[in-house]
Amino acid sequence: MAATTNLADTGTAAPPSRRERLRRATVSALTPIAVRLSSPSVWRYLWLVPPKPRFLRRHIAPHRGSWGTFDREIPERLRTFPGIRRDEAAADAAFAEEPLQDWIAVHDDTVRWMYRHGWDVYLVSAPRMVRSGRAITRVRRRPSAPVKRTTDPEELARLIKARGAELGISAVGIAAYDPRYTLAQAAGNVIGDRVIVCAMEQNWAATQTSPSVRSERSSFAAFGEVLRLGSQLGEYIQDLGYRVRPHDAQGEDIVLQYAVAAGLGQMGANGQVLTPFAGSRCRITTIETDAPLAIDHPVDYGINEICEACGICARRCPAGAIPGRRRMHRGVEKYKLNMARCAPVVAQAHGCAVCMKVCPVQRYGLKAVIDELEATGEILGKGTEELEGYTFHDRHYGPGERPTLRRDWLRPEGLTFDPERKRPLGDSLRHF
């Protein structure tokens, strides 16, 4: 990624290593070539690039294996409500007024700008993503078995979750289809009234280095893996006699809403689903199906109260993009992120992910956080270097410090991002 110097002089100076200087010089020199390689005519052939040997991917490889069941009792003081607090009438009205749009299609100019600044992550990760996309396409075209092996909803759900665990998917949940959370561009693709949610835990050690190239590549490694395994789970469902539509990297719905509805976690202050085992250190995909599956339900994990008591992500966000309070948006109560501040930083800081890195649920797991709260009344790791420290643009920021970004860093040359834009500007980047 191109180096940027538009930071105020705060934090403890940490000059880049010789290796990092060489990497930046190489990236800068190769950027014009990499941008040319971003055309669909080139990307469709990236699946031919052989995968790296496993030993070269261990430092970013996702965690394989099912999380199992979270059996820690939630203390009464942390209980609020299952899932997300909603105003159903307001959600219906928002959907009727303006269905949700595909972010990549609406902001394709911003995505292209972000690619220019982060191609050394995106292009390196692209072969895996393209191979996963091809696998998904094959499953979509594959016919289902002519005979249904079972029609019992509970048994079907059990079989599918067991198969997901065998494949190494971290968690599988099932939610009812909700048209309000299908993107407008995909509204005609729906094939059933059930949505299977698959989560894949990304590399723990890599995430603790955020923001970094390693951390961002680990995120894409987990995403590519959950898409690949999701396609295999889709084949299994087809063999049971039912239709499926696994979603690709661009997605066709709001996966966060379905993850909460399926009981995999609750929305955190960082705008992401916090799962009890990995916080938001996971990537999520969905599979639509017409199989009559037993539906899971939202769970109260105590996340709402923990986020209220914590607030670390809002305090440590380099862009200052996380609000201190929830508010209703499209009928959903949430911490509404300021994307005008978030997007430029994500593009220029290796995906940023500071809000994920400093979350105690991500680093320690929900059980340990609750245990500490019950024992001491404190948030585990709050105020410590271990949890809150991070290096941002060659400077280290410990507890109580964060970067001061100048206006030209938040409004960089060439970025035309308009968070209020509602309709697609141009062609979506379906090849990515």
Image (cartoon, helix red, strand yellow):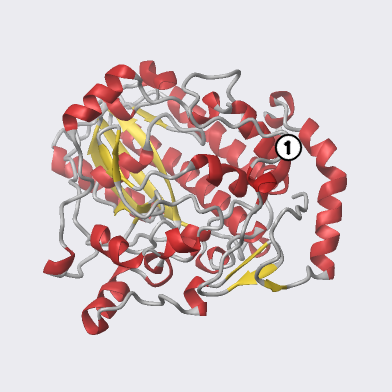
Q: Is residue 332 left or right of residue 314?
A: left
Picture coordinates of residue 177, whole percent (x, y): 25, 30
- Residue 418 falls in image quadrant: top right
Picture coordinates of residue 377, whole percent (x, y): 25, 79
Q: Is residue 6 left or right of residue 191?
A: right
Q: At numbered mark 1, what does the secondary structure look like: helix, strand or loop?
A: loop
Q: Is residue 369 left or right of residue 32?
A: left
Q: Is residue 127 left or right of residue 65?
A: right
Q: Which residue is mark 1?
A: 413
In front of the other: 129 or 259: 259
In front of the other: 200 or 232: 200
Can residue 50 be spotted in the picture?
A: no
Picture coordinates of residue 381, whole percent (x, y): 41, 77
Picture coordinates of residue 97, whole percent (x, y): 31, 18
Residue in view at x 69 percent, y 25 percent = 40
In front of the other: 173 or 392: 392
Residue in view at x 50 percent, y 41 percent = 339
Q: Amino acid at mark 1?
A: Glu
Residue in view at x 35 percent, y 69 percent = 365
Can residue 407 be spotted in the picture?
A: yes
Quadrant (top left, top right, bottom left, bottom right) of the C terminus:
top right
Would you place residue 109 above or below residue 67 in this image?
above
Count the marks: how many? 1
Q: Most extreme residue toward the bottom, as rendered? A: 375
